[in-house]
Every structure is written in structure tokens, then in C-alpha cells.
Image (cartoon, helix red, strand yellow):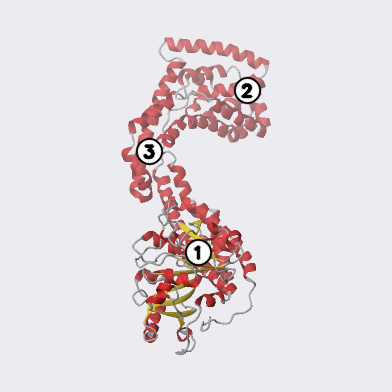
């Protein structure tokens, strides 16, 4: 186009090869956005759908960077500016009905070069639209059964359209129908060249100005001032143009004026007069009208296409308004959730004061594991001592100092359930405190704590507790696994233990009876037998250490204390942990549901590999475009 102010550039790779180089980055960036979209919505980050960078990435770069380049020229403007008339003249046929009523064009209408419809996937090239073959000049008015998100297309009936040029008539950018704005923006994102149709009344309206300001980043603009008093208003056009450029930041390739001529408008033969002085050229008052369609056909397709693609990329890469701002919002919200997680970890900690475990339950599991490893003498003595222990226990019950095993287990279960209920109550109170400290937690948990059925929570805990066996198969597997591991790591100690069981059987019956009769708080029979067994009042580990040490000598004492005590503590702790599991199940399944998983997912969102990868891609692409 004569008069365009183009700066010289160093030789660059062909357009197709540059598209191939960009395709991988564009595909990965789109994949990252798709993967993070749902998580970002959960975090409360702004939706990217309406952002300009998102439109450029998904509406321009993704559909065009991986296919044979075509140039899309869109005729855009406000209401009653004559867009459809200009479009028809450029195409050379009436593809859109030109009407005096405002906002009548609802669907974009595309004129394709002959044969292109079979070579190009129009649905992919224009995301959000459903392509439909043209049937009449009223198709652009919409209202069909398929809806108004149609892209009506027609191949050039005259066969004069360049092979890679698509011309589109768009809906108004400022009409009363807001959905028309969206369609016009979608076309703007997809196009390379915009023919901006302006009038004396519609060159600086806010909606028009904003639309073309967004297009100025990377799009090539051709400005057409329609319905002017030509040539009398030539100087006034210069003033309108200066305002338009200042307000939008656009740098148009060329500027044209169309005289206000009703007869030519009716016949579709309007004329275009170029104003080269507005784009760095020299005015020629004697110059006649030019063929704008031919001028568009004569542009450097590859250069303009690359300019459009690079412009779209720069919108995506813009650190103040591009994709990085969306990633910033994700990371910022994730940090807030990390803070909320910290508050929850600090506040929602409850010490469950469960009663001491019935020690015979744990010891019975240990004896079961030891059974195949003991000598025949030890086994026979154990049978005798079991009978003696049973008799001692019977005597204890008769004189009022003992209870049956079933009674003791019922007593234990009642005390245990009371402790679990108290822990549940305390936990709920502390959750309330955490919600008061953290707005994020309050938004997620507040409704549950206010409206939740607390009676149902306690009933659920009771049900789970009642169904819990005293010793589960899982716990038996745990005990055997721990003892197997311990025996592999301490083979010498195991031999000492087996020797002690054979030589010291006389002491064990009192220990067993004492455990069954009185538990850990007092072991009178064991104390009478000596060996410091009353230390059972403190820990089970101490009890076994002093039972074995006199039989094996001082050399084994250190090994016993270092090895067996932690083992026994793990076994008893494992049993208690399994008992308290019903509380955690009630909290998770009934009180909190999956909210803890939600908090963890949102708190770690900023560390997701997709975010890191996106940052790296933006950095690498930014370096490429800064060269």
C-alpha cells in the first residue's frame, strides 16, 4: 500500500518455518492453561476467558500457528458506519445485506478464495463459531435454528480474491446487543488485518476506541473514513485521524476516505480515496479513487502475517497484562491457602487422652508370634502357668480385686468412647477458632460448622466405635511385621529372649496374672516375685528389660534397652493409633468431607509443575522476541 510507513527489517526466516518454531511453545502454553483452568477457578483466580491474552493465545495463535498461513482481513466498526457496504465492495458481491437499521449484522460473513473451503478447517481457524455455507445475503442477520454463533462463509463468486486472503464482515463493536461485541472480538482475535470503518460520529466513541486499541497490539490496520464530504473535509479527516491514533495507539498502514454518495451506496459502487499524507507520504489532491480490494491483495502477506502473529505473542507475553498476571494470581491465591493450612495445622491439634491399652491384648499377639519359636519345655511350662494364672485370676475375682475380661473390656470401651467424644468436641471448637483467624478457611468450612448436624457427628463416632474390634486383622499384620523386622535386625537379642523364656518361666505366670488382674497401675504378684517388675507402672519397655536382664547378664542390658523398648512402644502405640482412627474417620467422612484434600491441593497449587513450566515458556519466548 503506497504511503505505509514500514521500517526496513533484516532478512528473516520464511513465515511457515517461523510458525513451526512457534508451534511447540503455543501448544504447551495452551495445554498449561487447560490443565490449570479448573484449579485456578477453585483458587478464586480471575477467569482468563475474557482476557485479551487468552483470546490471542486460543483465538489467534493456536488455530493458525500449526497450519498453512492464510491472511484474514476483517471489516470492523461501530453501528451505522457502513461495514457491510464496504465488505460487499471489497468482495465484489453482496455477501451481507446492508441495512439502515443499527446492529442488524449478528453473524460474521467470510468470503473465501475459491477452493479454500476444502483446504482449511474453518471451525479451528475461528474458535467459538460454527461454520455454515452461505445461502443468501440475509444470513448475517442471524435468527436461524442453529443460533447466532455462526460463521457464514462463501467462496468468491468472481474468482478474483487472492488465494490466501479471507475477507470478513463483522457484527457491530458497540451495538446494544452485547453478544455482538463478543463475536466481533472473536473475529478480531483471529484476523491479521483490520479494515477500521469510521465516521465523523464514530471515530472516538469509548466502545469503538477500546475495540481498536486492543487491536493495535500487533494487528495491521487500514482506516476507512466513510460518508465524508470529499474533498472538503480532507483537513478535518486529519484531525479525526490524529485523535483516533492518539487514543488507540494504532499505526495504520493506510487511510482512505469514502465520499457520502447515496446513489453509489445503493448500487454498491462507492469509491475509496487514499490520504497518504497521514501515513508518512505526500498528499496528491488530484489523485483519483483507488481499488482498495486490489490494494489489500497487493500487500506483503508473509510480513503482515508475521507481524500479526508476533503481535499476538507479545500480548500473551506482556508482563503487566499477559498470561504472567494469571499465573501471578494463581500463586498469590495459593500462598493465601498455604497460610490457611498453617492456621489449621496450628489450631486443629487435639491431644486424645485415651485410656491405657489392655496390655494382655498386645502381649497375646506377641506370644502368638513367639509360639513357633519357643522350646517344648517352655511351651509345656506356659500351659501349666496359664492354668495357674486362670486360678489366680478366679481367686482375685472372688475376693473382689479382679474383673472378668469381658467386664474390663466394656469398662475400657466406655472410657475410650468418652475420651473420643471429648476430643471431637475440642476439635470442632478449634476449627471454629481457625475459621475466625482465616477468611479462606471461613469460606470453605464456616457453613459446615454453623449448619452441620453435630448430633449426627457424635452418632457416627459411636457407630464406628461400636463396630471396632478390640484387635483387628490389620493390627495383627502390623505386630507380626514389626516383630519380623526386629528379629531380622537383632538376631542375637532374639536368642537371648528365647533363652530367657525357657529359663525364666517361673517368673512369667505372676506377670501374666498380674497383667490380667490389675493392669499396669499395680502388679502385686509381680512385685513379690522380684526382678524390679513394679517398674511396669512406667512403661512396658522397662518391665521387659528388668525381667530379662538378670537371666542374661549385664552385657545384654544395653541392647535390650536400646532395641526392645522402642519396639514395644511402637506396638502399643500402633494399637492406640488404630483405636483413635475412628475419630479421624468421623472427622474426614462426616464433618469435613474432602475439604482437607481441597486445602492441600490449593495450598500447593503454586508449586505445580505446570506453573513452573509456563513461567519457563514465557521466559524463553520473551527472550526470543527481545532479540
Q: Are marks 2 and 3 in contact (CB under 8 Å)?
A: no
The answer to whether residue 607 is visible is no
Q: Position of residue 189 (x, y in %)?
A: 48, 65
Residue at the spot 44% in from the left edge and 40% down from the top edge: 594
Instruction: Determine which of the numbered discs, if any, sits on residue 110 in the image.
Output: 1
CB atoms of marks 1 and 3 within 8 Å: no
- Nearer to us: label 2 or label 3: 3
Nearer to us in this view, 515 or 405: 405
Q: Secondary structure at mark 1?
A: strand
Q: Quadrant of residue 451?
A: top left
Q: Which numbered mark, 2 or 1, is in the foreground of this view? A: 1
Residue 200 x/y as whole percent: 35, 77
At numbered mark 3, what does the secondary structure look like: helix, strand or loop?
A: helix
| Mark toward the start of the polypeptide (2 vs 3) | 2
The residue beneath circle 2 is: 370
Judge the density around disc 3: few (<14), some (14-19), many (≥20) Cα neighbours within 10 Å: some
First along the sequence among labels 2 and 1: 1
Considering the numbered disc 2 on the image, is that residue within a helix, a strand or a loop?
helix
Q: In terms of depth relative to the viewer, which is nearer, 328 or 70?
A: 70
- Residue 545: name its quadrant: top right
**Mark nearer the N terminus (1 vs 3):** 1
Where 602 falls versus 457 (above or below)? Answer: below
Q: Residue at x 60, y 59 (%)?
A: 118
Tell me whether circle 2 and circle 1 mark residues in contact (CB < 8 Å). no
Crowd band around label 1 with a 10 angstrom C-alpha radius: few (<14), some (14–19), many (20+) = many
C-alpha distance separating marks 1 and 3: 64 Å
User: Which residue in the protein does label 3 denote?
Assistant: 427
Amino acid at each position: 500500500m503506497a504511503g505505509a510507513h514500514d521500517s526496513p527489517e533484516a532478512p528473516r526466516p520464511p513465515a511457515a518455518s517461523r510458525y513451526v518454531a512457534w508451534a511447540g511453545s503455543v501448544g504447551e502454553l495452551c495445554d498449561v492453561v487447560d490443565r490449570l483452568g479448573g484449579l485456578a477457578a477453585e483458587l478464586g483466580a480471575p477467569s482468563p476467558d475474557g482476557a485479551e491474552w487468552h483470546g490471542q493465545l486460543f483465538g489467534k495463535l493456536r488455530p493458525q500457528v500449526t497450519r498453512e498461513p492464510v491472511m484474514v482481513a476483517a471489516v470492523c466498526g461501530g453501528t451505522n458506519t457502513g461495514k457491510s457496504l464496504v465488505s460487499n465492495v471489497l468482495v465484489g458481491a453482496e455477501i451481507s445485506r446492508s441495512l439502515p437499521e443499527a446492529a442488524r449484522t449478528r453473524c460474521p460473513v467470510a468470503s473465501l478464495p475459491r477452493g479454500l473451503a476444502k483446504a482449511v478447517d474453518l471451525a479451528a481457524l475461528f474458535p467459538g463459531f460454527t461454520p455454515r455455507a452461505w445461502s443468501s445475503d440475509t444470513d448475517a442477520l442471524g435468527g436461524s435454528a442453529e443460533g447466532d454463533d455462526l460463521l457464514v462463509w462463501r467462496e468468491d463468486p468472481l474468482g478474483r480474491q487472492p488465494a490466501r486472503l479471507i475477507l470478513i464482515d463483522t457484527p457491530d463493536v458497540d451495538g446494544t446487543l452485547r453478544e455482538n461485541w463478543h463475536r466481533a472480538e472473536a473475529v478480531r482475535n483471529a484476523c491479521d488485518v483490520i479494515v477500521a470503518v469510521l465516521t465523523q460520529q464514530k471515530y472516538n466513541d469509548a466502545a469503538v476506541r477500546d475495540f481498536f486499541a486492543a487491536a493495535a497490539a500487533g494487528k495491521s490496520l487500514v482506516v476507512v473514513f466513510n460518508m465524508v464530504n470529499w474533498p472538503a473535509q480532507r483537513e478535518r479527516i486529519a484531525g479525526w485521524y490524529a485523535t483516533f491514533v492518539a487514543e488507540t495507539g494504532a499505526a495504520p498502514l493506510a487511510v482512505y476516505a469514502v465520499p457520502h454518495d447515496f446513489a453509489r451506496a445503493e448500487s454498491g459502487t462507492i469509491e475509496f480515496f487514499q490520504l497518504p499524507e497521514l501515513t508518512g507520504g505526500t498528499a496528491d489532491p488530484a489523485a483519483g479513487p483507488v481499488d482498495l480490494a486490489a490494494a489489500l491483495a497487493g500487500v506483503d502477506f508473509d510480513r503482515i502475517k508475521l507481524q500479526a502473529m508476533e503481535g499476538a505473542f507479545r500480548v500473551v507475553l506482556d508482563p503487566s497484562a499477559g498470561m504472567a498476571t494469571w499465573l501471578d494470581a494463581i500463586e498469590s491465591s495459593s500462598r493465601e491457602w498455604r497460610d490457611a493450612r498453617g492456621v489449621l495445622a496450628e489450631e486443629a491439634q487435639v491431644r486424645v487422652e485415651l485410656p491405657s491399652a489392655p496390655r494382655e491384648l498386645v502381649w497375646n499377639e506377641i506370644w502368638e508370634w513367639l509360639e513357633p519359636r519357643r522350646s517344648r519345655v517352655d511351651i509345656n511350662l506356659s500351659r501349666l502357668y496359664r492354668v495357674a494364672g486362670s486360678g489366680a485370676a478366679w481367686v482375685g475375682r472372688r475376693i473382689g480385686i479382679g474383673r472378668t475380661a469381658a467386664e474390663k473390656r466394656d469398662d475400657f470401651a466406655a472410657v475410650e468412647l468418652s475420651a473420643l467424644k471429648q476430643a471431637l468436641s475440642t476439635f470442632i471448637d478449634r476449627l471454629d477458632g481457625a475459621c475466625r483467624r482465616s477468611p479462606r478457611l471461613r469460606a470453605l468450612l464456616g457453613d459446615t460448622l454453623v449448619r452441620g448436624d453435630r448430633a449426627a457427628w457424635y452418632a457416627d463416632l459411636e457407630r464406628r466405635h461400636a463396630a471396632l474390634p478390640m484387635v483387628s486383622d490389620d493390627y495383627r499384620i502390623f505386630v507380626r511385621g514389626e516383630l519380623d523386622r526386629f528379629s531380622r535386625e537383632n538376631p542375637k537379642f532374639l536368642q537371648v529372649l528365647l533363652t530367657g523364656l525357657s529359663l525364666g518361666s517361673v517368673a512369667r505366670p505372676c506377670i501374666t496374672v498380674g497383667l490380667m488382674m490389675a493392669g499396669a497401675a499395680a502388679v502385686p504378684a509381680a512385685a513379690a516375685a522380684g526382678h524390679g517388675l513394679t517398674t511396669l507402672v512406667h512403661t512396658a519397655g522397662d518391665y521387659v528389660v528388668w525381667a530379662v536382664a538378670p537371666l542374661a547378664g549385664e552385657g545384654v542390658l544395653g541392647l535390650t534397652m536400646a532395641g526392645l523398648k522402642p519396639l514395644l512402644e511402637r506396638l502399643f502405640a500402633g494399637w492406640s493409633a488404630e483405636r483413635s482412627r475412628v475419630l479421624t474417620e468421623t472427622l474426614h467422612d462426616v464433618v469435613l468431607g474432602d475439604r482437607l484434600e481441597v486445602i492441600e491441593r490449593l495450598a500447593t497449587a503454586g508449586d505445580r509443575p505446570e506453573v513452573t513450566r509456563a513461567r519457563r515458556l514465557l521466559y524463553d519466548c520473551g527472550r526470543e522476541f527481545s532479540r
